[in-house]
Each structure stands twice: as C-alpha cells, then as structure tokens.
Amino acid sequence: MADTSDFKNGLVLKIDGQLQQIVEFQHVKPGKGPAFVRTKLKNVLSGKVVDKTFNAGVKVETATVDRRDMTYLYHDGSDYIFMDSQTFDQIGIPEQTVGKGAGFLLENMTVQVATHEDAPLYVELPVTVELEVTHTEPGLQGDRSSAGTKPATVETGAEVQVPLFINVGDKLKIDSRDGGYLGRVNS
C-alpha cells in the first residue's frame, strides 16, 4: 500500500484489478476544500492513458513490477523466446505481449521485460535499432508523388518508409517505437 505522498513517476498501482503506471502527477491544495492529487495513469497492458484524481492521504494498492534485461533468442510459433541475462532461464512471451516492436527484434538483442507475479506485461526495446535493408525498389529521380520516400524491407522483415536514396545493403537507424527512419549508419 502507498499513500498519495509516496506517488512518483513510474510507480505501478493496482486499481480495480488493473495495473496502472503513473505517467505524471500533481499535488493540488486549493484555497478552499481538501487537498488532492491529480494523476495521469497509463494502463500497463493496453497502453490506454486516463486521468484520475485521488484525495490527499488516500491509501492505494501498489503492484511490484520487476524489470529485467533479457536477450531475444528466437521466434517459435506464436511465442518469442527470451533468456534472462542473470539466471539464463528461458521464457516464451506471446506475440500480442511483445507488441509492434516484434518487427524490429534481432536475435541476441538485449531488451527489458517487465513482469508482475512472473507474468510478462510488456517488452521494451531500445529506442533506436540498427537494421540492414534487404529489399527496396530503386528510387526514381524526380518522383515526388510519394513525398520523397519509398518502402524498404529490413532484415527482420519489417517494412519502413525511407528516403529515395536508400539502397539494398544500407544500414539504417530506426525508431523502434513507431518504425520511423532516423538516418543511415556509417559502417
């Protein structure tokens, strides 16, 4: 249990059976009436963000979320297999838990896996990943109908929009959160 004075960004609360992470909070003491805490909470599983107000001093149940560095090993059916870097235990995480980041997972990549009571909640990839282009059409000079971008397939199989000058074999820096092109990596 935690008091509203214990709130801090990143704290995970258990509210109505759901795990909610505090994104931001603000203690408010109006001139008239009791103090309260205004929070912005993000559902750990769905990612949905909601605003919630707590009266000051209210006790709220907290949840223990364990974040560990794990190494991605391979994809097996609908599960992604990760290995704990300290204990070398292997766990399978379903595709929907891994989320959109699955398209940017390379073997032996280190990621953070958050668990609650040994159940995986989400997988956090590094913000930027470096991947090689395996297929893309040659860019046509003067083609501005696509705002200067074209689709390219990277070594993990994901498709990203890249500038026209990118060729097969180029190594790219990609934002793993939204799949956006950030630049070329010089080898």
Image (cartoon, rainbow, N blue to C red):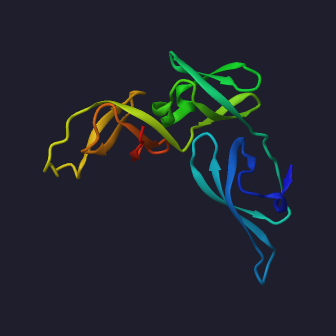
Residue 57 pos. (x, y %): 86, 63
**Which residue is the extreme one toward the front?**
187
x and y percentages locating residue 134 in the rendered image: 33, 28
Residue 77 position, x and y percent, is 50, 15
The quarter of the rendered structure image containing the C terminus is top left
Which residue ends up furthest to the bottom in the rendered image? 31
Q: Is residue 154 above or below residue 183?
A: above
Q: Does 12 sit above or below residue 8?
A: above
Residue 24 falls left or right of residue 131: right
What residue is drawn where x is 28% and y is 36%? 167
Asked whether, in this view, residue 10 is left or right of residue 141, the answer is right
Where 74 sits versus 48, above or below?
above
Q: How many marks?
A: 0
From the top left corner, tell me how far across and down residue 135 is, in percent: 29, 29
* Relative depth, front residue between 82 and 170: 170
Q: Nearer the viewer, residue 165 or 161?
A: 165
- Residue at the location (49% across, 44% down)? 177
Q: Nearer the viewer, residue 54 or 66?
A: 66
Residue occupying the point 15% across, 43% down: 140
| Outermost residue, top side | 77
Instruction: Residue 80: tell me if it is visible.
Output: no
Residue 45 shows up from this direction: yes
